[in-house]
Image (spheres, rainbow, N blue to C red):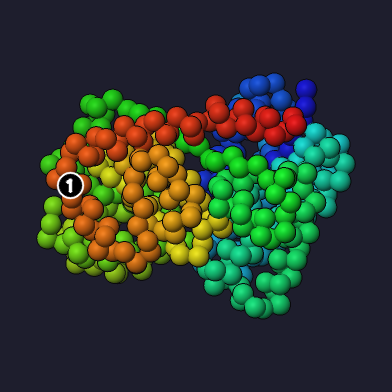
Amino acid sequence: MKTYVFTNRVYPPVGGATGELLKELAEGLAARGDRVVVVTSRGPRDQRRGGLKDQGDQGYETINGVRLIRVGTTPFTRASHWRRAMSYAGLYPQFAWQVRKLGAVDAVISMTDPPLQIAMVTFAAGRAKKRIHWAQDVYPELAEELGVVSRSGLLARALRSVSTWALRRQDEIVAVGRCMRERLVRRGVDAEKIEVIPNWSSVTPVAPEQVQAMREQLGWNGKFIALYSGNIGLAHDFETLVGAAKLLEGGGVQMVFAGEGPRLAELKTAMQGMRNVFFLPSQAKEDLSAFLAAADVHLVSVRAGLEGFVVPSKAYGILAAGRPLLCVGPSVSEIAVLLVESGAGMVFANGDASGLADVLTKLSGDPARIRMLEEQALKVANEFTLGKSVLYWHSVLES
């Protein structure tokens, strides 16, 4: 039996997309007979109830074959960059200490939450047979593009130097998109070390009657719904979506935004008074498949210049729900390339609000075109399943 150790800030029940992905992969590997350990944070929920303390000060538990080591830190917040950084700073040494205590394991896999944990984990994993980095984002470039740190500042240069040092010392790096692979190569990472394994989705197709029930519940019957579902965050292009919504006002297309995030208040202000735009909270995981399938088309966006630094993995859930996807973002971004290759949707340049509005108007009156796009979405979704990703990962870990 081999032992694999993952490190990530979040793991269910503590919320976060990377935690959900890690849980599914870790349980998939454990089901194959591997010993899987996850070092993660307690998160605010556990802190409020006093933490998990069945062994000393740390939280230990085993869920579905995965051994969890939960460490404490200051509460995570998005209200301030510095308070968030302090929360991260409390995790780095604890992650490193736990990895060091685990000793000569078969592989230590660091993720990108918190950013740049790879440096501390790499230093601590000296006795591991393999060191692997699972890149969901690329730092510090992402922080620079989002204005969190100054691109030309001393901090950015120092963080890039540390990050490059750690990346070059990995035995392998798993990137979630081809565009991300190119960014890492440009950083100076050996291309032979980088494996592209896209994220996947646990969304499954639902019966037509479930879709109909969800549309009735949401009041969508008889309406053409263009849905943006997910994080309303800094890395996404909402300006183009706002522009398209304004051009569509008074027509037959309704745009719905479902989710939370730092730009939600700004987005609501920009859309204030518009009768064809609606907002919903994030949906429960058990309702997500039916919710995604209830929309007619979906929207995903990436800000110009962020291609390869982020890859919106929610796209795979949309395709798995059998729904067409319209992507606003750079043509070389992973999801844009995938849609062009598969024919499961269409791509619009950042700022092309009129093009997006025009296509939405045409699709609202063309059910045959919608059905064709739905068929292509389901076909391509078969390439992005948990089962296939577990096999790919097992190959990387065993190689």
> Image check: 150 left or right of 261?
right
Q: Nearer the viewer, residue 113 or 353?
A: 353
> Image check: 363 left or right of 19?
left
- Residue sticking out furthest to the front: 341
Residue 40 visible (yes or no):
no
| Residue for point 22% across, 39% down | 369
Percent across and percent down for residue 329 are: 41, 58
Q: Quadrant of residue 223?
A: top left
| Residue for point 36% across, 53% down | 347
Q: Quadrant of the C terminus?
A: top right
Q: Nearer the viewer, residue 309 or 231?
A: 309
Q: Nearer the viewer, residue 68 or 58?
A: 68
Residue 359 visible (yes or no):
yes
Whether 205 is drawn above or below 229: the answer is above
Disc 1 element: helix
Q: Amino acid at mark 1?
A: Ser
